[in-house]
Structure formats: C-alpha cells, structure tokens
Amino acid sequence: MARSETFILAIDQGTTGTTVAIVDAKGKVRQKTSVEYRQIYPKPGWVEHNPEDIWRSVLAVLAASMKKARLKASGIAAIGITNQRETVVVWDRKSHKPVHNAIVWQDRRTTPYCEELKRAGREAWLKEKTGLVVDPYFSASKLNWLLANVSGLREKAVKGDVLAGTIDAFLLWRLTGGREHKTDVSNASRTQLMDLASGGWDDELLSLFDVPRAILPRIAASSGEFGVTKGLKVLPDGIPIAGIAGDQQAALFGQTCFEPGESKCTFGTGSFLLMNTGHELVRSGSGLLTTAAWRLKGDAKTTFALEGGAFICGAAVQFLRDQLGFIKSAAEVEKLAKGTRDSGGVEFVPALTGLGAPHWDPGARGLISGLTRGTTRAQIARATLEAMALQNTDILLAMREDLKSGLKSVRVDGGAAANNLLMQIQADYLGVDVVRPRMIETTVAGAAYLAGLGVGLWKDLGEIQKVWKTDRVFRPKWSAPAREDRLRRWSRAVARAREERP
C-alpha cells in the first residue's frame, strides 16, 4: 500500500469524553469524532466514571470515524492511545467486567490516607523515589482505597482473579480481547508505584500502598507493538496497537518538544505545563513533579520532564456554564469576557477540587471575591479566563526556579487554546511568547506519532518535526511592573482560598 494511503487511528480517551482521529502520513487529521460520557459524583470531592461508559464511547467514535472517513481497515497502519492519567480501573480477569467504577484523577476521597502518609514522614522518600508528591491525585492511594473498600476485592487480587491499571491498560485489554495487560512508562510513572530511576514497579512502594504486584500491567516503551486487535465488531483482528502515552506526555510529544528545555501547556479539563529535561532526572524543590515523558522503541533510556498541573482549567468554564448558567456553551466565554477591559477587581480561584502544583493543597476551596453591586457577568467571565492563565503562571515561575533559567516561549494546545483572548492574557502574565500550532489537539497528534514510529510510518523524530506547523504567536504586551502587581493580587486571592477549609 502506498504511504499516502496509510493512516493511524488515534484514540484520545479524556476526562469528559473520547475522541478518535484519523491521521495520515503527513501528520494531518483527516477526520475527528468525539463523544461525551457521564460524570459521576457519589459524594462531595468524589469523582467516578463507569468504565463501560468509557468503553462504549471508544467503540462509538471508532465506528463513527471509520464511517465518516470511508476508511477501509486495510488502510490502518496502527492504533495509538492517549488517556486521562492517574484514573484507576479494576476489572475481572475472566469476564473483563469492571468490579467498581473507575476512580478519576480529580477524586479527593483519599485525602485522609495521604495525610497519614505525610504524618508518618513518608513524603520526602516518596518524592525521591517516584518524582511525585503525596496527594490524592495519583493512582496508588486510589487503588489502595478500592482494595480496602470493595467487598472481597483484596482476596480476589491476591488470587489473581482481577487486574488493575490506568485507562490505557483497560482499553488495551479490551482492544486485544484480553490478551495483553500492559501500560507504558509515562502512565506507570503517574501511579506512584513505579521507581522513576529504574522504570519498574517497586517492591517498597507496593508494600507501602498494599498493592499486589500480580494485578498490575507490564511496563513497556511508549512506542512499539503492545498487541493487536481481537474480537471487535468495529475493527478487524490484527491491527497493531503501537503507541501509548498519558495525555500530557502525548501532548509534549505532539508539540515536538523533543529537546531538553522545550515546553508546552495543555488547556484541557485541567491545565498542564511540561518541560522536556532529556535523560536527566531533574528534582524539583518548588512543588513541581518529575515524571517520565516517554521511552521510544529501541531506546534503552527514558526521556523525563518537569511537570506542574492545575486541576481545574477548562472545567472552570464548564462550571460557569453548568452550575452558574452564565453561558450556554463553553465557546461563548470569550465573547462574554471581551465585553469588559478587565475583571473589575473580581478574582476567581477555581480550587473546586483543591489546588495542584505548586501548592498541593487538597483542602483548598474555590473562591470568587471582589464582588460589588456593579459586578457583571462579563467581569466574572474575564476573571475565569485570567484565573486559568494565572494558575499556569504560578507553575512556570516554579519551573524557572528549579531550572535556574528562563523560557523563550511556551507551546500551547487543548480546546481552550483556540481562545485568542485567553492566549493573549497568558502571554501577558507569563512574559514570554505563547505559540499555538495549527492543530491544537496535540494529544491526538502525540498518540499518532508514537504509533507511527512504532510501526515505521515515520522513521525518526526529524520526520515528525517537519509536519508541525505554527498557527499564531501571541507576544506579551504588559510591562514587568504591571505583571508583578497582577501576580501579587492573585497570590493574595490564592492565600484566601487556602484558608477556606471544609
């Protein structure tokens, strides 16, 4: 088959929905289909997904994409998967059915358990071994909760009757008809069960969190053959799954940030800023995470990254839409916010599920302050966009502190990166150029590039770099004093949000 007729199916399994994109050999998205699925909130601070809802969404968008693109299965070179990270699923080995709803990365139910670990003095040791802070965000405490609270589950785990993993592992299991239980190094590094230096599951970590090794997937490189499709109605048997990465690492790869010092910021449900540090493990003293970015097929060494993330980014706009009724669609927020020159002193700290990097305060609560009788919907909308950008600025400042160097630019992606006002605000607050690519859904691109490398559709990183194109560069317009004054006001608002304990 001619290379021009060869495609990658990229599955982007996100927090609120699933997307499948058909990517050609030039890196162009030929067709993209998305579907949302249920969000489940059993208690305040608890967030769950039904894994069957996720699986049905994957099948639906696979079928719809193939139909819309009129793509024959013979043209599919490989499948790539990128996924919401840290979310945990446990399923029955024989029936393949989940034993409980997935516990989502946003879920905070394990806060008391994490506080116990801190009081026991395990925080520094855990960060040294895993690159991660002690926080409910990560998978290990969630898996510990499931094993302790789902009746009979620990006994089944000890017997080997159940399997566990992040969403990528669950999808791989289903796509291969239960033949492959694997994950990639980027997802494994987010569980807090992997030793970052060795790249393998760690006995001491497994013991601390009381997780049986036998239920966990095998850790593999991010590109290469994970398995082949088996028993699916929407796809024939034998299509290789050849690339897997957590969504933020996939976005870093999709932005072609292949060299140390290159960075990206993804505006999704949360926002995440990652910087490639090469094969060097850079330890953060500023509240950032050290994480595995990827390991490529045939490469013995892992590429690492520094990361900071805010739990609520695009979800703050959803909050305006769904809870407050300010807008009917997320796209309306830019037009509404443009109706005012500034926020009129309104500050919105969207700590709706606690605060992530660099604060790591799961008990913080969301805060809207500075309201007057004259406050308008437009000003609150503007304050929401400003908060999204200010959270990222906090992370970047922490990153600069760790690296003892500045940044020339930041590449942006994700749905909210299409918001020109938000991108200009971000450039003004960061004080560096914000560069937006033509394709802002770079998580999909990263999954496709990894899968394409895995089957040789692209021979090396240089070929991939040729397909990345700039759409627009947003240059900062603010003076340094104006920027510093704005950041001081934001810091005061964040301090107040951290005082609002439940």
Image: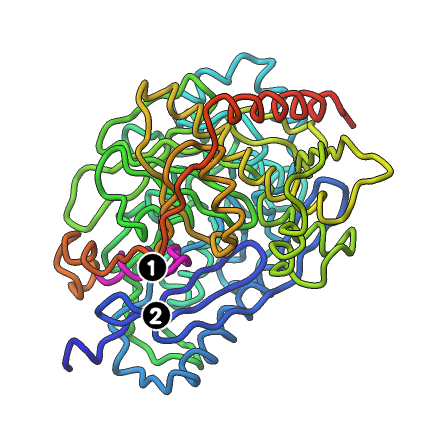
N-terminal of the pair, mark 1 or mark 2, is: 2
The amino acid marked with disc number 2 is Val
Q: Is the magenta stretch mostly helix, strand or loop?
A: helix
The amino acid marked with disc number 1 is Ala
Answer few, some or many: residues within 10 Å of disc 1's Cα (few below 14, many 20 plus, some between 14 and 19): many
Q: Is residue 244 above or below residue 135?
A: below
Q: Is mark 1 on a helix, strand or loop?
A: helix
In the rendered image, which quarter contains the C terminus? Answer: top right
Instruction: Please name the residue shown 39% across and 75% down the image.
Output: 31
Q: Disc 1 versus disc 2: distance between alpha carbons?
A: 8 Å
Q: Which of 44 and 253 is in front in this view?
A: 253
Estimate the x, y position of residue 490 in percent, counting from the top left.
62, 26
Q: State if disc 2 and disc 1 touch (CB < 8 Å).
A: yes
Instruction: Please name the residue shown 42% across and 77% down the image.
Output: 232
Q: What stretch is highlighted in magenta?
A: 438-452
Q: Which label was assigned to residue 445?
A: 1
Q: Is residue 261 above or below residue 69?
A: above
* Residue identifier under label 2: 29
Instruction: Please name the residue shown 15% across and 82% down the image.
Output: 1
Q: In this view, does 44 lie above or below 11?
A: above
Q: Which of 475 and 297 is in front in this view?
A: 475
Estimate the x, y position of residue 201 in percent, counting from the top left.
36, 35
Queried whether the magenta region covers residue 284, the answer comes back as: no
Res. 446 in view: yes
Q: Nearer the viewer, residue 483 or 31?
A: 483
